[in-house]
Each structure stands twice: as structure tokens, then as C-alpha cells.
Amino acid sequence: MAVLDRVPTDRINARAKALSAGRVALTVVAAVLFGLGWLIAKALGGAWFVLAWCFAAIQVGWNDARGRD
């Protein structure tokens, strides 16, 4: 019980009652959209690196086949 005595439950309850359901829903939607955007950016960044690496490998192979350095 000592731990619960140190937790400011009155302040937490007051804050919880002051929350608006609409604002909480919008925050959740915004967080999901932000997360999706972040994941897509990471995936596209990785795909861009793979494409750039493949292009560089083709150039090196082409130059080696033609005897250039």
C-alpha cells in the first residue's frame, strides 16, 4: 500500500477527466499516420540504396567487361 500512497492518483484522475474523447482519437489517428509515414520512408530509403547499389554494380561490371577501370 505504500507505493499507492506515493502515486498522485488525485492529479491523475483530474487529468483523465479533463481529456476530450475527440482529441484523444485524433491524437491516436495522427500517431498511426506518423508511424506509417516513418515506416514507408525507411522502406523507400532502403529500396533506394538497393537500387543505387545495383546500378553501381552494373557500372563496375560493364567497365570490367570493356577493360576500363
Image (spheres, grey):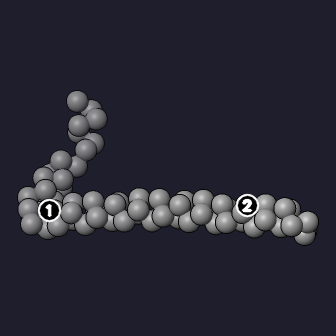
Q: Nearer the viewer, residue 50 or 25?
A: 50
Vertical side of 4 occupied by 53: above or below: below
Question: Which residue bears the numbered disc 2?
Answer: 57
Q: Quadrant of the C terminus?
A: bottom right
Q: Is residue 10 left or right of residue 65?
A: left
Question: Which residue bears the numbered disc 1?
Answer: 25
Location of residue 61 (image quadrant) = bottom right
Q: Under tag 1, what secondary structure?
A: helix
Q: Nearer the viewer, residue 42 or 21?
A: 42
Residue contact between numbered discs 2 and 1, judged by CB atoms under 8 Å: no
Within-10-Å neighbours for mark 2: few <14, some 14–19, many 20+: few
Residue under the point 53% across and 61% down? 47
User: CA–CA distance between discs 2 and 1?
Assistant: 48 Å
> Amino acid type of disc 2?
Ala
Within-10-Å neighbours for mark 1: few <14, some 14–19, many 20+: few
> Amino acid type of disc 1?
Ala
Q: Is residue 52 left or right of residue 24?
A: right
Residue under the point 90% across and 69% down? 68
